Amino acid sequence: MGADQCRVSAEKQRVGHLATCSSSMQPHIVPVTFAFRNGSIVIGIDEKPKSTTKLKRLRNILENPRVSLMWDEYDEDWTKLWWVRGDGVGLIIESGLVWEAAWAALNAKYLQYQGSRHEGPCMSVEIDSWSGWSYS
Amino acid sequence: MGADQCRVSAEKQRVGHLATCSSSMQPHIVPVTFAFRNGSIVIGIDEKPKSTTKLKRLRNILENPRVSLMWDEYDEDWTKLWWVRGDGVGLIIESGLVWEAAWAALNAKYLQYQGSRHEGPCMSVEIDSWSGWSYS
């Protein structure tokens, strides 16, 4: 799969998985909501600001900005299996116009956010390497 | 969620996500088949032995044995969301009785492996820290 095809497949998805790694080399993984915006991927951290300072994925990114994002869907028919991975750099955004635009993109994609007042930070990821696989 | 509840929820699943991290601090993530066996989690690497020496997840584990495994299911009804994570240490097993027993456990769980002649290595993961979350 070429990078463009990977990007198109990822953008259609509703959930992704984010891996980060602390300075002590412990990987960490979490499911994430996300939206594509201006060539970056924005990820919402839907928690109150005070609790987010404790979130492992945020501490890890401050220690080591390298991240990996994975999109895939499991099916018992293994001929339907596929995955797309994007490796890149994550940045935490706590306020300002970019923060507002990121949450606006997430709100537009996920009706479930309707009525929520976001206070938590966003993460913006720039992918520098795409890879993809499908059974067929 | 306590560790026992995490373990029970994870064991029921058909797919998990594995995160590893290279010595250069690049996280890596991949969907995996798995089976619980004698308190460990075995993961099949369903590739020919020669190609597996190139697999990033295997090279990463040789460089840094710390891994993170995640199980979750996405649902548009976010009140149904949950995840379970197990952090631990991964070991590559290339042959021998433990390798045979690991593939036997995977074959027993996944009918899709029927008729396959496994040649690739397995990974065995010892989880030392469980965590879990559910919306409700």
Image: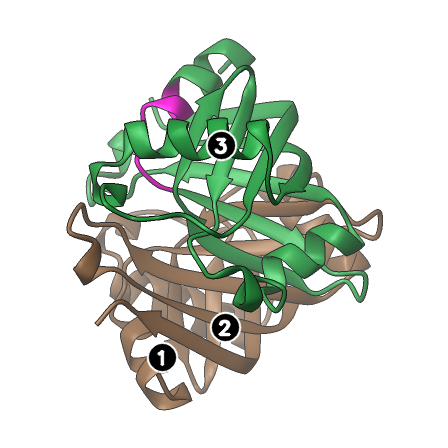
Chain colours: A green, B brown
Q: Which residue is mark 1?
A: B6
Marks 1 & 3 on one chain: no
Q: Chain of mark 3?
A: A
Instruction: Please count the marks in the image.
Output: 3
Cβ atoms under marks 3 and 2 closer than 8 Å? no
Q: Position of residue A8 (x, y in %)?
A: 40, 15
Q: Amino acid at mark 1?
A: Cys
Q: Quadrant of the N terminus of chain B?
A: bottom left
Q: Chain of mark 1?
A: B
Q: Which residues are magenta?
A: A9-15
Element under disc 1:
helix
**What whole-number distance in Å separates the C-alpha atoms at marks 2 and 1?**
8 Å
Which label belongs to residue A100?
3
Cβ atoms under marks 2 and 1 closer than 8 Å? yes
User: Which of B2/B11 is in front?
Assistant: B2
Q: Position of residue A99 (x, y in %)?
A: 54, 35
